[in-house]
Amino acid sequence: MESINMVEILGYVASVMVAISLMMKDIIWLRCLNFVGCALFVAYGYSIDAWPVAGMNAFVAGINVFHLIKIYRNKQLQAEPTTA
């Protein structure tokens, strides 16, 4: 039986992170865990020279960061007291 290498482990961990992220009810946790999974998939795709895998997951990671920033900015705006 062939031993599993670190690149394969990276791919499995990335898959598990993305799967776990999709089970989250809280959108912030979903975005954070999905970002981690995507970042791991970027590293995995790079290490196996699978540029479509790396590129697509880099794009999705960017979308997650965009939405997280948007969520936190909206929370800050809501927390600021309004002056009349």
Image: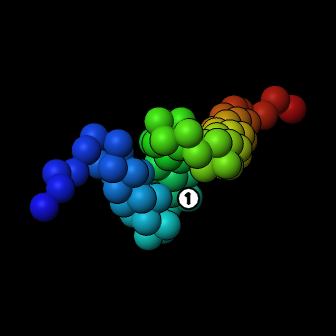
Q: Residue at x 51, y 52 (%)?
A: 34
On the question of residue 84 being in view, the answer is: yes
Quarter holding the C terminus?
Answer: top right
Q: Position of residue 38 (x, y in %)?
A: 53, 47
Q: Position of residue 75 (x, y in %)?
A: 65, 42
SS of the residue at dot 1? helix
On the question of residue 64 being in view, the answer is: no
Q: Is residue 56 left or right of residue 39?
A: right
Vertical comparison of 3 with 61: above or below: below
Q: Quadrant of residue 10?
A: top left
Q: Residue at x 35, y 42 (%)?
A: 7
Q: Quadrant of residue 71?
A: top right
Residue linked to disc 1:
27
Q: Is residue 41 left or right of residue 74?
A: left
76 or 2: nearer the eye? 2
Vertical comparison of 15 with 5: above or below: below
5 or 69: nearer the eye? 5
Q: Position of residue 41 (x, y in %)?
A: 50, 46
Q: Is residue 73 left or right of residue 2?
A: right
